[in-house]
Image (spheres, helix red, strand yellow):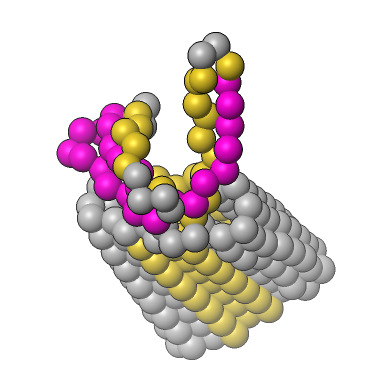
Amino acid sequence: MFKGEAGNDQLYGMGGQDNLSGEDGNDTLDSGDGDDNLEGGEGDDELTAGKGEDQLYGKAGNDTLDAGDGHDYLEGGEGDDEITAGEGDDQAYGGAGSDSINGNAGNDLLDGEEGDDVIEGEDGDDYILGGEGDDELSAGAGNDLLEGGEGNDSLPYMAMRVIIFLMVGKVMMSCMVAVVAIHLYCSKVQGMIQFIISRWMMISLS
């Protein structure tokens, strides 16, 4: 266990399984190689993962968390945090505060939790949750699932393409179409999609 003091500390891991704790202050923690555990503590901290499967906890403060090459776990904690997933299949949780979360590569789980968050999926098949608050969610390349949660959330739809399935007699047919507008009713199970041909179609969201 490498533990900092009340000031602004710099802690660096080596090739093994390290535990770094910044404690109070604006600290810089770098895991290096190995499967490491990093905790920022109070203050505006910078936590960087390496090649292993690391766990990063920002704790209180406006923290910056960067995942590495492995399958990492990132948790911002209280404060307005900036979290960037890495090359692996990562799990990122914003915690309380208005956070910015970027999925980067990999099939990631991105959860803003409390606060007005901005979450971008980027590459990979991501599961994106806004949580509480007025969030802005956007998917990237891959087959992503977006869930707004509580609050007034925004999901950009421009250039969105969907596959629809239609029953023609007893034959199931499918085609890909471009979506130009989406309108959802107060009901959780019905809404309407406007396709590029400017016709509206009733859909069921269940």
- How far across and how far down the image is residue 180, in percent? 39, 56
What is the quadrant of residue 14 in the picture? bottom right
Compare residues 54 and 3 and report the one nearer the observer. 54
Name the dominant secondary structure of the magenta segment. strand
Residue 144 vs 118, above or below: the answer is above
Q: Is residue 130 visible?
A: no
Residue 160 vs 65, above or below: the answer is above
- How far across and how far down the image is residue 37, in percent? 62, 61
Residue at x 28% of width, y 52% of height:
132
Residue placed furthest toward the right: 15
Compare residues 37 and 50 and report the one nearer the observer. 50
Direction from residue 78 to residue 2 in the image, left or right: right
Assign the C terminus to one quadrant of the image.
top left
Compare residues 173 and 133 and report the one nearer the observer. 173
Compare residues 156 and 8 and report the one nearer the observer. 156
Assign the N terminus to one quadrant of the image.
bottom right
- How far across and how far down the image is residue 10, in percent? 59, 85
Residue placed furthest toward the left: 186
Residue at x 62% of width, y 58% of height:
141
Residue 131 vs 158, above or below: the answer is above
What is the quadrant of residue 201 in the picture? top left
- How far across and how far down the image is residue 162, in percent? 52, 44
Direction from residue 22 to residue 86 in the image, left or right: right
Residue at x 49% of width, y 75% of height:
64
Examine the structure image and report whether residue 180 is included in the region drawn in magenta: yes
Residue 47 vs 187, above or below: the answer is below
Residue placed furthest toward the top: 170
Q: Is residue 32 visible?
A: yes
Residue at x 29% of width, y 56% of height:
153
**Total numbered labels placed on residues in the image:** 0
Q: Which residues are magenta?
A: 172-194
